[in-house]
Amino acid sequence: MTRHFLRDDDLSPAEQREVLRLAAELKREPFSRRPLEGPRSAAVFFDKTSTRTRFSFAAGVAELGGNPIIVNPGEAQLGVKESISDTARVLSRMVSLIVWRTFAHSGLEEMAAHATVPVINSLSDDFHPCQILADLQTIAERKGELAGLTATYVGDAANNMGHSYLLGFATAGMHIRVAGPEGYHPRPDIVEDAVRIAGETGGSVSLFTDPAEAVADADAVITDTWVSMGQEGEKADRIAIFNPYRVTPELMAHAKDDAIFLHCLPAYREYEVAPEVIDGPQSVVWDEAENRTHAQKALMAWLLDRA
Ligand code: CP
Ligand code: NVA
């Protein structure tokens, strides 16, 4: 059975640990694994813009010995002149991996249902699981053992990052707290899944509306943009709604003294995070960005091993 990575809980806790161990190995020895030698190709589709995901997948596929084929918005027949299922069947005859950044998560599910090569979600409206692997690698580098740590995500808890932190961090056995305004809490079915996973891993899941309460004694504080791709029309409303959730030095003071700050980037210093935080000594955002490459190379190698 071909394995895919569409949601964070597509990896079991043991599998997630294996991928993270491989990510650390590939960070030390970037050219030690060459599963795409040949070169074999990977299709990397973008329906939304990207800097980190584009470069980390292009570089990562090449470093694994392969050939990345980057497809920008509007360049392929996919979803316009040709169905997702037909695209999946065709590409499975041509490439060894399909990576897709898109809007509706259901499109990825359809692609995976018809592909015979691994499909990787490189961001959908509902999840951004590749980012979470990089975040876990970054936290482990600073804090060691992930299980038992407390991480608080502050801001739009109903977006792809909020959902992925719930599933991915619960899988790691962490205590994941999310804080957002009423109406911007995560989807109930995803909360339910995260609670079930946390029950198996020894982690926990808590939802807050008060950011200071949520951040109290946390080991890691995390935020994301208040206006995700596709929500640009709601910008003015969102900035007003999320303003109390800005990560400032005052909010960070509620966390542990040695707490770290993460942000998937791109970041808006005038909105969700103050410059003193993202550019200050607690910030690990540049390591986090670098780790996208290592974590995704590990994920690709792991999936290809099972393809
Ligand atoms: N964090 C992230 O996915 O960045 P890009 O949108 O630049 O790919
Ligand atoms: N929530 C953001 C993440 C960007 C990497 C978005 O979807 O735009």
Image (cartoon, rainbow, N blue to C red):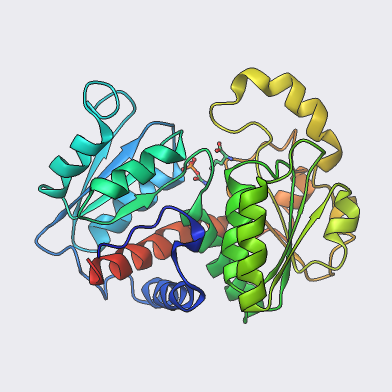
The picture places residue 63, in percent across and down from the top left corner, at: 26, 61
Q: Is residue 101 left or right of residue 180?
A: left
Q: How many marks?
A: 0
Q: Residue at x 68, y 22 (%)?
A: 235
Instruction: For the C terminus, give its image quadrant.
Output: bottom left
The picture places residue 45, in percent across and down from the top left corner, at: 31, 38
**Image quadrant, ligand 2:** top right
Front-most of residues 188 and 41: 188
Image quarter of residue 111:
top left
Front-most of residues 216 and 121: 121
- Residue 98 vertical placement versus 23 (above, below): above
Front-most of residues 28 and 300: 300
Res 201 visible? yes
Q: Is residue 254 left or right of residue 99?
A: right
The picture places residue 103, in percent across and down from the top left corner, at: 46, 33
Image quarter of residue 233:
top right
